[in-house]
Amino acid sequence: MTTRTIVIGAGIVGLSTAWHLQERGHEVTVVDRAGIAAGSSWGNAGWLAPGKTIPLADPSLWRTGLVSLLDPDAALRIPLRLDPGMWSFLIRFAAHGTNRAWDRAMAALTPIDRIALAAYDELAAGGIEAPVREGPYVIGFAEAAQSRGFEREIAGAVRHGQDVPLEKLDEPRELAPQLSEQVRHAFRLDGQRWIEPGPYVEALGAAVAERGATMRLRSTVVDVAAGGPRPVVVLADHEHLHADRVVIATGAWLPALARRLGVRTRVQAGRGYSFTVPVDEPARHPVYLPFQRIACTPYEGRFRIAGTMEFRRPDDPPQPRRIRAIVAQARAMLTGIDLDDRRDEWVGARPVTPDGLPLVGATRDPRVFVAGGHGMWGVVLGPATGRLLAERIDTGRTPAEIAPFDPLR
């Protein structure tokens, strides 16, 4: 008998889960309030960098957190506002800013980090034709002292079992002519890949549809009713969709549906901004400016520049000052680009958990599952998450790689 499964959310995580459920013979319906890649899966930097897929909270948070309260243009922005839920999250998030907590979270992330790129290979072998490109990444700093935190993060990933090739560069502009002469200390980071995220996720969504999924786009889910004979997905127009299994993969909006199902971990929107600019010379490789927290990627003949972490409500309007802050930081470090010819200005709500770990697995109702809370790492971990969760749904066994991500923790 065919299992009917509804996946709520048409981003990289939801669509990867849908694709792998189809591989296992499920009859899949995908529901999304907007469309394919309409959220954080569209405007991010497209980095498939497991070597940089690390906990967000670390001991430096105690310094940068204070700056973020006082400086409205800081890379990490925490607006001063009366929002008890957000401040409750921030207290828990800051409590994980210790070396011990970082190591604990890194140990939990490393197993899925190590299979992240192979999961993209599996999708390619299954017919997803959107390109996945090899690195290297070029990492730039104005001076050597600024690189200490970055090198410490890479060393932490290596210590936990990842292979993260890092090499000092004498002439970084040979690989990335977009770096200005202000960049006097640089590295080459290998073993990572990148995609153009919008086109890639659209190709994945098209494949899911072509394989027979029912695509209910521009349909808003207001409730997942569990406890009856079958789970019921309730739409805003009062339509009821019945299923054998349900997956909630709605990113920063996950608590709205999952909280009543026993998922108590708060998911806070950590909003990022991006835009694209023209380049004088073709951009061939991703560029990272860790001190400025700016990530750049070649994108459809232009250069996508992304950055900031802004803790606000996911549906708050964009804050133009955040774009201006990225531009101000980029002017000194980048060259041969026109920062005044910005297109595709975008804000997306990345789903951040206090302990830095995703929420992947069954809810209090064993027929309803969640997949979210990946923070900045939804794109790199999305396909692996989808494969592992599909295995959990189909077999009832929890793969070791997602065991630490129990959504009922």
Image (spheres, rainbow, N blue to C red):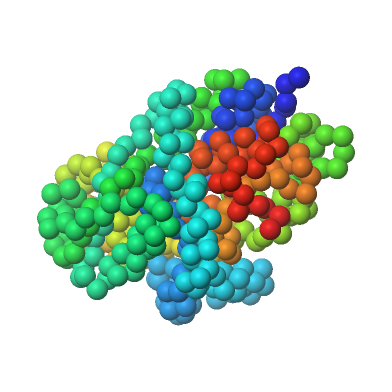
Q: Is residue 18 above or below residue 171?
A: above
Say which residue appears at 64% left-offset and 22% top-offset: 25
Q: How many marks?
A: 0
Q: Quadrant of the N terminus?
A: top right
Say which residue appears at 19% left-offset and 50% top-offset: 176
Residue 318 is situated, as x and y percent measured from the top left of the image, at 49, 58
Q: Is residue 363 above or below residue 132?
A: below
Residue 111 is situated, as x and y percent measured from the top left of the image, at 49, 48
Residue 88 is situated, as x and y percent measured from the top left of the image, at 64, 72
Q: Nearer the viewer, residue 188 or 235?
A: 188
Say which residue appears at 58% left-offset and 53% top-offset: 358
Residue 377 is situated, as x and y percent measured from the top left of the image, at 47, 51
- Hey, which quadrant is residue 395 in on the image? top right
On screen, residue 407 versus residue 226, left or right, reads left
On screen, residue 202 versus residue 191, left or right, reads right
Is residue 316 among the parts visible in the rendering? no
- Hey, which quadrant is residue 211 in on the image? top right
On screen, residue 136 versus residue 314, left or right, reads left
Say which residue appears at 62% left-offset and 35% top-offset: 390
Q: Quadrant of the C terminus?
A: bottom right
Q: Residue furthest right?
A: 228
Q: Nearer the viewer, residue 20 or 338?
A: 20
